[in-house]
Amino acid sequence: MGLRIGIVGATGAVGQEALQLLELGALSIAEIRLFASVRSAGRVRSFRRETVRIEEISAERLAGLDYVFFSAGASISRQYAPAAVKGGAIVIDNSSAFRMAREIPLVVPEVNAKELGRHPGIIANPNCTAAILATAVWPLHQAAIVERIVVATYQAASGAGAKALAELDAQVRQYAAGEEIRRKVFPEQIAFNVFSHNTPVDDSGFNEEENKVAQEIRKIFGEPTLGVCATCIRVPVFRAHSEAVVLETRRKLSAEEAREILSHAPGVAVVDDRKANRFPTPLEAAGKREVLVGRLREDPSHPRALALFVSGDQLLKGAAWNAVQILELLAAG
Amino acid sequence: MGLRIGIVGATGAVGQEALQLLELGALSIAEIRLFASVRSAGRVRSFRRETVRIEEISAERLAGLDYVFFSAGASISRQYAPAAVKGGAIVIDNSSAFRMAREIPLVVPEVNAKELGRHPGIIANPNCTAAILATAVWPLHQAAIVERIVVATYQAASGAGAKALAELDAQVRQYAAGEEIRRKVFPEQIAFNVFSHNTPVDDSGFNEEENKVAQEIRKIFGEPTLGVCATCIRVPVFRAHSEAVVLETRRKLSAEEAREILSHAPGVAVVDDRKANRFPTPLEAAGKREVLVGRLREDPSHPRALALFVSGDQLLKGAAWNAVQILELLAAG
């Protein structure tokens, strides 16, 4: 009696990672169904020695599944997630569609797995930057109560999807070939440049990504008044996001104590070798399920602040791996 | 009656920029002398229609000049700057050798040009990251008194010299050619990666670059107790450093007021178009003498904090242009 699992957005970067994680995982799976737009329908993928044909998404086809991952953007989730729930499934939604809905849990398993006990059929998977930050900061919050987070990010191109990833590759090849560098996906050149996250900016001056990080961290932590100031920046990295973080805590945390806490924290790997100058990098974090944390140091400009640097794979802990963790917890009952 | 000017480190990235700025500038120059290691001696450079032969540096050859720029590393400055002063010159030193010496002014002209009135023959030019930060923050400090600076940097490869710049170029070409990416200058791969600044880390966990930024900002501002927490990170950008900054001020500054102040500030160009999502980038800052400032917004996590994003050419305002500004002020008496 295995599970019947669907993946909506199966040809996208996150969908492909989810499929691979399920393949490598221990879950007993009776049936896997892959959904995408009509463009990809008919293509095939292999899964545990079977060949799976990609189907065009429709409300009818989503019926009769136990769990459905959604990772095809907020509008697809809004359109089809309710149908999947009606058809009997629990939806794990990687889009932003339901994250801030009061009745829908927003879950990072290492932080608030208990929220999985009550849900209306949909569970939201957080924004990638928020999930990585939450995993690194939560153990310190439990120890010393974080009151304010100041974070500046170094976000990989692939956070904006496969086309953005291809644009970084193309621009670098244009550079190497001595050709003019052409822009299409990003408003600014991504090769050899950094720029403010390409989401709309509101009247306060913060962009959508920065607001997501702030709102989602507060919801995941269950701390509606937690102060967050985020600056979200794209960098010419293929995969994995990094974050320079300063935390202000109610109780002073020494770097030593923070290192000790994080070294036992689930989902975290401490990379903090001061002598060898070895700290988290996106290159090392890429492909890893753990969030790398290092550069732990007491901030001399505040009586109770701690600085750290975090790198995490935004397709894994920031998306597919977090979603698969949720599924595994739900399936384990 | 023109000036007699020497450049030590004339073949380095900063020395070449200084030579070009002098060439384009309005100063009356009677003689320009270029110094480098024995390796480069004998090569020639053109300057205002003259051909200048590069000389091997020696104490004797530095005699009889009015001004000498040093940009060949701290040990060369320590070895030869006193000789240049003895020989009658005023030294403008771009290395870290004398920056924190109490009797030597550390000058960003837009901030503390008045310090040029009293010096022992040597004037120190700040660290590139500190000079760019100082230019952007000083006008706000004057308006509202900055009490704490939290800054995360996005530093270009060329900040580590011409070999580092070449390594980014080489690694990207290796990638495009499908070859293995090789490291030599930086301890971590610089292409498609970000990493903690490659300077030694002290017992507090801060690296040398971060400590320079903190100490130098305090000295330039004349604010020995100003709180600074810096995280210095290398990014795969050829030229120009960027900085995500959060300032805590004694008096609350609105984003509006900060924009107004900065729009009139010397050495600063405001790039802050929220609708078009156009903000400072290193690509736009490269080759400009001004420091670009944008992303001005009130930090919701603090009653009196302001967030901003800065990009500045670390070879110009971060080095050669700041040094030439100092020379022009001294020459104008």
Image (cartoon, coloured by chain):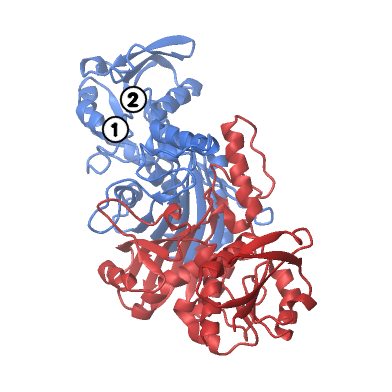
Chain colours: A blue, B red
Camera sees residue A302: no
Q: Residue furthest bottom?
A: B118
Total number of numbered discs in the rendering: 2
* Residue at mark 2: A9
Q: Chain of mark 2?
A: A
Q: In terms of depth relative to the viewer, which is nearer, B197 or B60?
A: B60
Q: In terms of depth relative to the viewer, which is nearer, B39 or B48?
A: B48
Give the secondary structure at mark 2: loop
Mark number displayed over residue B158: none
Residue B296, x across and y down, in percent: 32, 63
Camera sees residue B245: yes
Is B252 situated above or below A185? Answer: below
Give the secondary structure at mark 1: loop
Q: In terms of depth relative to the viewer, which is nearer, B135 or A154?
A: B135
Residue B75, x across and y down, in percent: 73, 70
Q: In terms of depth relative to the viewer, which is nearer, B331 or B79?
A: B331
Residue type highlighted by circle 2:
Gly
Name which residue lies at 74% across and 75% down.
B80
Is A23 situated above or below A198? Answer: above
* Residue at mark 1: A73
Q: CA distance from mark 2 to mark 1?
A: 8 Å
**Circles 2 and 1 in contact, beta carbons < 8 Å:** yes
Residue type highlighted by circle 1:
Gly
Of the two numbered discs 2 and 1 on the same chain, state the one appearing first in sequence: 2
Residue A175, x across and y down, in percent: 51, 39
Left or right of A78 in this view: A212: right
Check disc 2: other Cα within 10 Å, few if <14, some if 14-19, many if 20+: many
Name which residue lies at 36% across and 37% down.
A185
Is B53 situated above or below B188? Answer: below
Check disc 1: other Cα within 10 Å, few if <14, some if 14-19, many if 20+: some
Q: Residue furthest front?
A: B49
